[in-house]
Amino acid sequence: MLARTMGAGAGAESPLPVAAPVEEDAPSRLAAHAELLQACIAGHALQTVFQPILDLRHGAVYGYEALSRGPAGSVAEAPLDLFALARRYGLGAELEHAAVECAVERFSRLGADAKLFVNFSPAVLAAGGQDRGSLLDLLRRHGLAPKQIVIELTEYGDIRDSAKAWEELIRCRHSGFAVAIDDLGEGFASLRLWSELRPEYVKIDKHFVRDIHRDAIKLQMARAIQQIAHVTGTSVVAEGLENEPDFQTIRDLGIRHGQGYLIGRPQAQPDPAPAELWRRLSEAPVASFPVAASSVNRVSARRLMREVSPAAPEDTNDLVYERFEADPDLQMIPVVRDGAPLGVINRFTLIDRFARQYRREVFGKKPCTVFMNDQPLVVEAEDSIHQLSYALAGGSHRALVDGFIVVEGGRYAGVGTAQDLIREMTELQIAAARYANPLTLLPGNVPIAEHVERLLGRGSRFVACYCDLDNFKPYNDVFGYQRGDEAIQLTAHVLAESCDPRIDFLGHVGGDDFVVVFQSEDWDARCSRILAQFGERSAALFTAEDRERGGFLAEDRQGNERQFPLLSLSIGAVPVEPGTYDSHSAIATASTEAKRLAKRQAGNSVFVERRRFPASSVRPAGDAS
């Protein structure tokens, strides 16, 4: 991959070919540029700086991105100017080779226990096939292993059009290198490359990170990227973190890595892990940002549906190709026989196949099913977009590119795309943006009240449950805010797992207080399951010593140290029949009193308020009667 310098070494000063100069360049300027570039490519004048990439979960430096600079004070000091000048004189690939060598050599001097992210373009990858062992040799000479290197793809829009570049990339991965897609979000090519390559990392372009804490659209895009990454096993790196609210928002979305001036500027000798910064940001209040509204369960796939005339399975590839040529906005054509969907043909897949030599001559007259995806994602028109998003994320990666087919009673009705889904969910989230809990991504007080009032207005039967942690304040005082946040997030997960997202509503009042509005008939069994699950999983929040003695030591309100019981969960449940309560406020008062009575019981317990019906009862965890 680095065939240019492997023979003479990085410091060799052999003459370099220079492409014909641009006419307006004076001879003296051309000579100066050629001399500067030659010095950079030989390694004498090229600077390498390293910008840290932080693990947002633990505050440790996970890796460094290597960045190249020209000589200080020169016309090529800035990296964009440096590489633009090299490309102008036909030396772009040579300069990239030199940059990789310098990055590896200088990174080895740091002795850092971290990953090295190195930028590669398709041109350099394509050239690498001529001397594939050179990069491995370079790493061996400097005591590095392929598993420490992340190939960061830049300017990758045409990488699939270069067979050499693609083959070399696959070979590098087989040798142990990881791959990152840079600047995700700049165009469709990055999403398509993600679905085909399945990289270990994707880096969100800084445009979508800057001011994300107050931009609902950027937030939704980042959340969608994180959801896809979770399904595909990819780690996300958020670039451009420059202020604390953005940092906190990215962290609470669950994004694993961050990079930006707030964490560290590019330096030849980067600072060690920013422990003080991490401690301050971890303990700071979290910025508020919008979350998905419960209304996603009330919007169906029908709203996303586009009517596209299907192709018949006997239609030729030429005929389908002509339809794509006639309509630039047409992204996919379903293939249908007698109303039953058989598959889908993607615009880019067909055009890519026809672009290869003799492919159209060979396949143009053949049936369109030759290039059809015969396992498309098919959804019913009345499926909620919540169900659709899970099906899209959990299905074949091709669905992200090909889209989905909408049917009514099994018969073809239309098509939709992943972009349509993201756009619709973004609009719903903007509508709910004013009221959200930032830690758990659950609806807050106002959406809870609106939901209960809506049920009361319809005369629905439901059960309002007020959930609260016992001994949370002393736990927070002893273990710290970060562990306290973990306890709250664990509670949210346990509650969510026992809710039916189609009909039940989960909200976060604030702190360690939650509200669940059950419409599920088996709400009683769900409450028992919640208590059992919390009792089992909350043990991980304590040390082995605390678990053995059944409590933890903390100061009481009088400043005396005493033992408090382990965290437990109390639930105050209020069954609501039509006509028994006239407002959300009345139900809130009743559920608060029920929760207070539940907290009188030791351990995990639920109190069911039945004073408007039969006598009330207290039931400890595990008693389902």
Image (cartoon, rainbow, N blue to C red):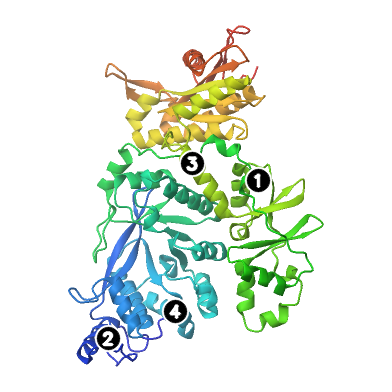
Occupied quadrant, residue 612: top right
In space, the residues marked 2 and 4 are separated at their CA atoms by 19 Å
The answer to whether the residues at label 3 and label 1 have Cβ atoms under 8 Å apart is no
Image position, residue 345 (x, y; %): 67, 65
The span from disc 2 to disc 1 (Cα, nearest Å) is 61 Å
- The residue identified by callout 3 is 429
Pair 3/1: label in front: 1
Specify the amino acid type for callout 2: Gln
Quarter of the image where one finds residue 582: top right
Q: Is residue 390 above or below residue 510?
A: below
- Residue pictured at 44% horizontal, 79% vertical: 123
Which corner quadrant holds the N terminus?
bottom left
For residue 257, say whether it is visible.
Answer: yes
Q: Is residue 62 left or right of residue 226?
A: left
Q: Label 1: which residue?
A: 302
User: x, y (%) of residue 160?
Assistant: 54, 73
Q: Amino acid at mark 3?
A: Gln
